[in-house]
Image (tube, rainbow, N blue to C red):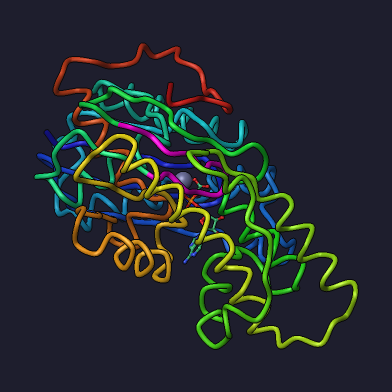
Amino acid sequence: MIILGIESSCDESAVSICKDGKILSNVVSSQKVHNNYGGVVPEIASREHDRLLNHLVVKSINEANISLNNIEGIGVTKGPGLAGTLLTGVSFAKGFSQSINVPIIGINHLEAHIYANFLAYPKLEYPLVCLLVSGGHTQIWYIKNIFDYELLGDTRDDAAGEAFDKGSRILGLGYPGGPVIEKIANKGNSNAINFPRALMEKDNLEFSFSGLKTSLLYLVKKEQLFDVEDIVASYQKAILDVLVTKLLRAINIKKVNTCIIAGGVAANKCLRRMVNDKLNNRINAYYPDINLCTDNAAMIAFLAEIYLMKGIRSSIDFDVVPNLKLK
Ligand code: KG4
Ligand code: ZN
């Protein structure tokens, strides 16, 4: 099937076309306007999606080398995300599906992040453990079979991506924090400062990053003499240590041979190296290409095709769900 995917849950306006589980085009426009504010401004983000989506659809169709009447279905993110930006994308997608008379399905953004791994590695086999790490979520899932999820661990406060973004903000390094922190951390000593790692006691699979953020804030306020590279490298290491430790625990508890990492933080190369080092070829670890880790519409189109092939579709009056859960 040829499916058009639309993603507008936050500040990436994205459109993609997939056919039979493969990407024909994948267009992402990251809204730079928010950089001036140190974070996403919801109203501005909605207006930007509204301004961009039509152009991105045309671009996506051209790049895929298809015509409008080849499209057989539409997938659009219905949540979780910002209410206004979701509404912009869903309203656009509904109008478009009506005008070309094809089925539409509202897609869970978290599920799409997970399925980006199946898009990248079609031969992936269940059961597996997934570390889902994005700007709003830090969770560990046991996935026994297709669409069969068990939540093993969640964050009690900030998400890992949020820890990167807030840390970057405290240090005045800009938004989004993940990529800039990763870049600067490469030049620093990750053992220079011993930042706290929360909830590390045996068998605990929960996360908490708010103490780490506060500890960075105190360090900066005390004006202690550390190089910014060393602060950043140590801060990143504290986040990644916790993620890797808990992922390994979950793998051992569930006795799986495969793990996948999904969401924007999975783009972090240091995280990938640490996981590979710790697993030492005992377990197969998969991460999608970096452009499939951060928000994109290929993962939406890919998952929409799986649902539509099963005959599952949404009715035209479906709602956006800003706090949508995976389960
Ligand atoms: O999945 P995503 O694009 O959007 C959400 O669904 O939230 O994730 C965005 C998050 C941001 O917090 C961003 O700082 C983080 O992913 N991120 C990274 C990297 N690239 C993006 N974190 C660490 N290292 C990176 N290279
Ligand atoms: Zn995302």
Q: Is residue 103 left or right of residue 48?
A: left
For the N terminus, the image quarter is: top left
Q: Quadrant of residue 309?
A: top left
Q: Is residue 238 left or right of residue 257?
A: right
Q: x, y (%) of residue 252? A: 32, 42
Residue at (18% x, 51% y) in the render: 23
Q: Is residue 36 magenta?
A: no
Q: Is residue 78 above or below residue 20?
A: above
Q: Is residue 287 left or right of residue 239?
A: left
Q: Nearer the viewer, residue 207 or 64?
A: 207
Residue at (68% x, 66% y) in the render: 195
Q: Nearer the viewer, residue 112 or 218?
A: 218
Q: Quadrant of residue 303?
A: top left
| Dominant SS in magenta | strand
The part of the chain drawn in magenta is 131-142
Residue at (28% x, 22% y) in the render: 148
Q: x, y (%) of residue 218? A: 85, 66
Residue at (40% x, 31% y) in the render: 93
| Residue lying at the far front of the rendered structure | 202
Q: Is residue 135 magenta?
A: yes
Q: Nearer the viewer, residue 301 or 116?
A: 116
Q: x, y (%) of residue 177? A: 61, 65
Q: Is residue 82 left or right of residue 281?
A: right
Q: x, y (%) of residue 72? A: 17, 29
